[in-house]
Amino acid sequence: ARLIEDLAGATAAGQFEVYYQPTIDLAAGVTTGYEALLRWHHPTRGLVPPVEFVPLAEEGGHIVEIGRWVLGEATRQAAAWSAQAGRPVGIAVNLSPRQLADDDVVATVRDALAASGLPARQLTLEVTEGVLVRDVDQVVTQLLALRTTGVRIAIDDFGTGYSSLSYLRRLPADIVKIDRSFVQELGTGNRSTTLVASIIELARSLHLDVVAEGVETPEQQAVLGRLACSHAQGYLFGRPAPAGAQQPPAQALP
Ligand code: G
Ligand code: G
Ligand code: MN
Ligand code: NA
């Protein structure tokens, strides 16, 4: 069977799992939250990565149902970690263009927050420039509506699109996530350090938080520290892994 056909019953069959990757406060050196990253345990193909099935789920529309499940899982897990730690633990969930365009997305987010008891400010929704393939005014309206629930909005993979600056001006956002392609070149002697410094400065001037993605080496971490980048993610700090494999978070959100 084709993979897209198998997506239909996958949520009900319990084939999805949420992995979590820590987000680090660079100055304090502690985990402040996690990004939820979806995994599909396919009955015959084994673990199928999201780059293979998320576009199919987007195309077929299954992503709306799957995304609702991810939001439910991730908020429940973040609430449990917060209770365990006695401190607020953040959770970031990716939203694809189709999910954002869904009329029920605000209700879906409210439902997940209500069911989990997670305070809205602990939930971040990540969107990429890909959301702009849809009507820009409609996207802005949806993001503003989402924000009225109290959640935060992050621009994911920042810097990789065609119109990042105009995008940032138009979209209501709280956080910029610097794409790992820039982070991985830090310290290699080309212009990447200047570029990342510029993004951090831009974010600061717009009062946005910054998360550097894809940090793999202590050298990259050191450069980001010098640039006063507030948060980071990457294999250096932790790979995406099941909830049970995570260390209990050590400190409150900033
Ligand atoms: O680990 P990584 O392979 O987890 O993720 C690859 C891509 O899949 C990322 O670009 C990420 O945004 C996307 N992705 C991961 N989990 C989800 C999810 O729950 N929903 C959506 N829409 N995209 C996701
Ligand atoms: O597009 P988005 O940022 O949501 O997806 C995150 C993706 O980046 C996931 O596929 C995740 O597994 C991957 N990732 C996270 N940290 C690192 C890292 O340090 N190096 C690399 N190569 N990939 C990473
Ligand atoms: Mn992301
Ligand atoms: Na990213």
Image: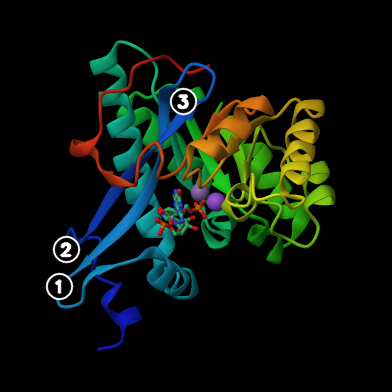
In x, y percent, where is residue 180? Answer: 57, 51
Which kind of residue does numbered mark 3 sit on?
Answer: Gln
Q: Residue at x 49, y 36 (%)?
A: 218
Calculate the distance from the C-alpha at mark 3 to the C-alpha at mark 1.
Answer: 34 Å
Q: Secondary structure at mark 3?
A: helix
Q: Secondary structure at mark 1?
A: loop
Residue at disc 1, CB closer than 8 Å to ligand 1: no
Residue placed furthest toward the front? 189
Q: Sequence order check: which comes first, mark 1 or mark 2?
A: 2
Left/right placement of residue 57 relative to residue 184 reads left
In x, y percent, where is residue 150? Answer: 56, 26
Placement of 11 over or under 31, stated as above or below: below
Viewer-nearest of discs 1 and 2: 1
Question: Which residue corresponds to mark 3?
Answer: 122
Q: Are marks 3 and 1 in contact (CB under 8 Å)?
A: no
Which kind of residue does numbered mark 2 sit on?
Answer: Ala
In x, y percent, where is residue 188? Answer: 65, 50
Residue at disc 2, CB closer than 8 Å to ligand 1: no
Residue 210: quadrant of the picture: top right
Which kind of residue does numbered mark 1 sit on?
Answer: Pro
Mark number displayed over residue 107 = none
Residue placed furthest toward the top? 86
- Circle 3: is it few (<14), some (14-19), or many (20+) Cα within 10 Å? many
Q: Are marks 1 and 2 in contact (CB under 8 Å)?
A: yes
> Which residue is more in the foreground, 234 or 76?
234
Placement of 167 over or under 64, stated as above or below: above
Q: Secondary structure at mark 2?
A: loop
Calculate the distance from the C-alpha at mark 3 to the C-alpha at mark 2.
Answer: 29 Å
Residue 154: quadrant of the picture: top right
Question: Which residue corresponds to mark 2?
Answer: 13
Mark number displayed over residue 43 = 1
